[in-house]
Amino acid sequence: MIPAPVLLYGDVWSGQLCPAPPRRGVMQQPSHPITVARKRRKLKKVALAGMISVNPTTIYRWERGLARPQPLQLQALATALQVDADELRAAIVGWVAQPPLDAENPSTDPPN
């Protein structure tokens, strides 16, 4: 499993990048399998879209879970990302978008 990326922000005084402080009460959603594979290959959405002949907006929608690749697109996507098509399909189907948990909204707090 890939570790979660560290968000960085600029330190005004030193001019260096520092880890961003965690947002209080908000849990980060796990990344979509396409996003993980794309970042592993160090590809931008536009570059990946060009490799498989789709609009960059399509990549955005796939990575947000708003749409899924069609079978031929999935095969091209797996080839471009250098992953097994069946494993990618299973990972996409198994990924479920989770709403962020908010400490100020008790309806989203886990039960005690």
Image: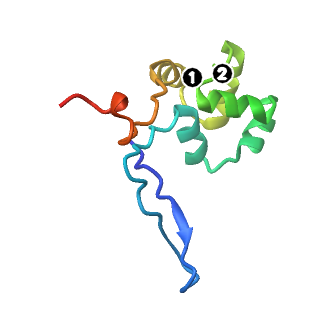
Name the residue tied to disc 1: 85
The residue at the point 62 percent across, 51 percent down is: 42
Name the foreground residue: 63 vs 90: 63
Name the foreground residue: 38 vs 15: 15
Check the picture and name the quadrant holding the C terminus.
top left
Question: How many marks on residues?
Answer: 2
Name the foreground residue: 46 vs 20: 20
Compared to residue 47, the image places residue 65 above or below, namely above
Compared to residue 62, the image places residue 38 above or below, namely below
Taking the image as shown, residue 29 lies to the left or right of residue 112, namely right
Q: What kind of residue is marked 1?
A: Ala
Q: What kind of residue is marked 2?
A: Gln
Q: Position of residue 36 (x, y in %)?
A: 53, 40
Closer to the chain start, of discs 2 and 1, is 2
- SS type, badge 2: helix
Q: Position of residue 35 (x, y in %)?
A: 58, 38
Query: Seen from this angle, which residue lies furthest left?
Result: 112
Q: Position of residue 1 (x, y in %)?
A: 38, 41
Q: Are marks 2 and 1 in contact (CB under 8 Å)?
A: yes
Name the foreground residue: 8 vs 47: 8
The residue at the point 58 percent across, 82 percent down is: 15
Name the residue tied to disc 2: 75
The residue at the point 57 percent across, 22 percent down is: 85
Q: Position of residue 46 (x, y in %)?
A: 77, 42
**Within-10-Å neighbours for mark 1: few <14, some 14–19, many 20+:** some
Compared to residue 102, the image places residue 84 above or below, namely above
Taking the image as shown, residue 71 lies to the left or right of residue 20, namely right
- SS type, badge 1: helix
Q: Residue 110 sits in which quadrant?
A: top left
Q: Which mark is residue 50?
A: none
**Within-10-Å neighbours for mark 2: few <14, some 14–19, many 20+:** some
Distance CA(mark 2)–CA(mark 1): 6 Å
